[in-house]
Image (cartoon, helix red, strand yellow):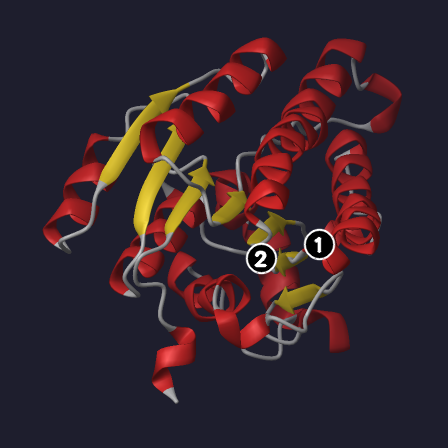
Amino acid sequence: MSSIFQLDGKTALVTGVSRGLGKGIALGFAKAGADIVGISVSNMDETKQEVEKLGRKFYDITADFLDLEAVKKAAKEAIEKAGKIDILVNNAGIIRRNDAKDFTEEDWNDVLNVNLNALYSISHIIGNHMIENEKGKIINIASMLSFQGGIRVPAYTASKHAVAGLTKALSNEWAKLGINVNAIAPGYMATDNTEALREDPVRSTNILGRIPAGRWGTPEDLVGPAVFLASDSSDYVSGHILCVDGGWMSS
């Protein structure tokens, strides 16, 4: 039974792999048997070393996700380096916080470019590669703000709603071609993106009070769901947004 959750012989492309959720997912995939291609704007040496300690290959490609041409080049380079991409995890993302009345056009464009436009560009290139191979798994990292409005994050909320919609749209076209497109919507995770919230005693207390599990999530909490969606065990799962939130959405 455990064999259907293994990723032996597969190569996974994970964006934003230098730390946080991306690093956690990459290490989880490596433990399940996959080689990793990492695309990040930040140094990936630590992730590379940990993946290689697990006996898997790690190919690192540096790209600024604000530069869409660089992102497209990186996606093509990933195919060239690895030979074949079986799994794509679109994890890279940014967040900018400000009241909507003061939110700048520059911040709006930056967030949409990284969280949505870069994600689509990579999915388009890698998706066509997978279509040629007649099989593949794409996992987009959505958010609780794919369902809710949030506070002081209008661009992030818009981008994550769009990620959920794009996941379903691509699934509708690509499921019949052997490509499963799904998304994971993490709850409140202890990562760089939530540092400001965790350091605000009022906001942190309010958030924890609404999480039935009673704690912030960790990158390790995403590993099992990500391996499931990347493995053969999820071959009939497509267009789904899987909440990994400690019960937040049910509270």
For the point 48% across and 42% down, which residue is it? 195
Toward which corner of the image does residue 186 lie, by quadrant? bottom right
| Nearer to us in this view, 82 or 185 | 82
- For residue 62, the mark is none
Q: Position of residue 245 (x, y in %)?
A: 61, 67
| Nearer to us in this view, 103 or 59 | 59
Horizontal side of residue 243 vs 151, given as left or right: left
For the point 15% across and 40% down, which residue is it? 49
For the point 88% across and 22% down, which residue is it? 101
Which badge, 2 or 1, is on the more N-terminal residue?
A: 1
Q: Is residue 55 above or below residue 73?
A: below
Q: Which residue is mark 1?
A: 177
Horizontal side of residue 95 vs 26, given as left or right: right
For the point 15% across and 56% down, which residue is it? 54
The kind of residue tagged 1 is Leu
Q: Position of residue 128 (x, y in %)?
A: 64, 36
Toward which corner of the image does residue 118 lie, by quadrant? top right
Horizontal side of residue 190 vs 126, given as left or right: left
The kind of residue tagged 2 is Tyr
> Residue furthest toward the bottom?
1
Q: Is residue 248 above or below residue 46?
A: below
Q: Which residue is mark 2?
A: 188
> Which mark is in front, 2 or 1?
1
Q: Position of residue 210 (x, y in %)?
A: 68, 71
Q: How many marks?
A: 2
Secondary element type, mark 2: loop
| Nearer to us in this view, 60 or 246 | 60
Give neighbour class at mark 2: few <14, some 14-19, many 20+ (Cα, 10 Å): many
Q: Are marks 2 and 1 in contact (CB under 8 Å)?
A: no
